[in-house]
Amino acid sequence: MSQIAILGGGVMGEAVLAGLLRSGRAADTVLVGEKRAERAAELAERHGVRVVDNVEAAVADTVVLVVKPQDVPGVLDEIAPALRDGQLVVSLAAGVTTDAIEARVPSGVAVARVMPNTPALLGEGMAAVSPGSTCSEGQLAVAEELMAVVGRVARVPEAQQDAVTAVSGSGPAYVFLVAEAMIEAGVHLGLPRATAHELAVQTIVGAATMLRDGETHPTVLREQVTSPGGTTAAALGRLEHHGVRAAFLDALAAARDRSRELADD
């Protein structure tokens, strides 16, 4: 079985590691590059994998970069001498383009770019994958299979990655904000906080499951809940009055623009 190295043993790196092992991959086919000794020992004990330095890990067939965007250049410069033709580098670093990575690795190394999100920690992530200039169909499939162990995967042109960042990369925060607002409103209306929390959270989980597992368009689902002149219609009318749709459009455009700015830094 081919070998995979995960460079970066933080929360997302461990999520990918755990997902690989859950999927049936043998622990002896996975290397982890982690410089913090305490964290390295923790990962080795918890998952039974070898934790080594980045250069030693970089011999793997697939090298997964799960480090902060600002750390990518340094890590690539560190491992570049150890990389060889035919390897695949999969980057989960937000805003770092495949061009930027390809400029720091040998010409025979393929690159794929991934935008994950935090529900990957529970195996419910949404990742978008884009190929670099020399990434083959087979190598792109490897990147997709890698991310499928922590959720769902979509293939997009790299030019759309900033929009992906705005929708799904940052998306969990929008849902958390909606949950927070619903809970606070419930408390304002006289519910105990624990009750408001349970009502809001399970409502969001249930609605999300209907969206994911059904075949009904969100507009139709919304209309099915909205009786003419009823309570839902009254609430939605106030949300429309406050421009919620326009606010989301403006917010996601701001996230997309910021993603572009970070890529240019």
Image (spheres, rainbow, N blue to C red):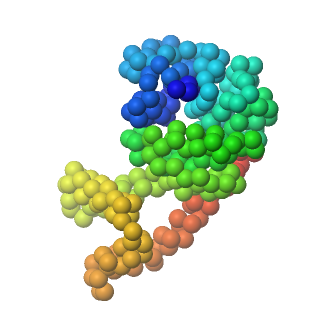
The x and y percentages for residue 107 are 80, 32
Residue 176's place in the image compared with 238, above or below, is: above
Which residue sits at x=59%, y=65%? 250
Seen from this angle, which residue lies furthest bottom? 228
* Residue in the picture at 71% in, 36% down: 110
Query: Closer to the camera, 173 or 111?
Result: 111
Where is residue 128 drawn, in percent x and y?
57, 49
In terms of image quadrants, where is residue 47?
top left
82 versus 175 height, above or below: above
Residue at x 55%, y 53% (from the top left corner): 154
Left or right of residue 117, residue 221 in this image: left
Does residue 48 show up? yes
Q: Where 78 sits versus 219, above or below?
A: above
Whether residue 255 appears in this view of the structure is no
Q: Position of residue 73 (x, y in %)?
A: 72, 29
Identify the residue shown where x is 36% and y is 54%.
180
Nearest the camera: 57 or 115?
57
Q: Position of residue 65 (x, y in %)?
A: 61, 31
Q: Is residue 12 above or below residue 153?
A: above
Number of on-image labels: 0
Does residue 211 appear to the left or right of 162 in the view shown? Answer: left
Q: Considering the image in quadrants, where does the C terminus appear?
A: top right
**Apparent side of residue 85 relative to residue 88 in the rendered image (left or right):** right
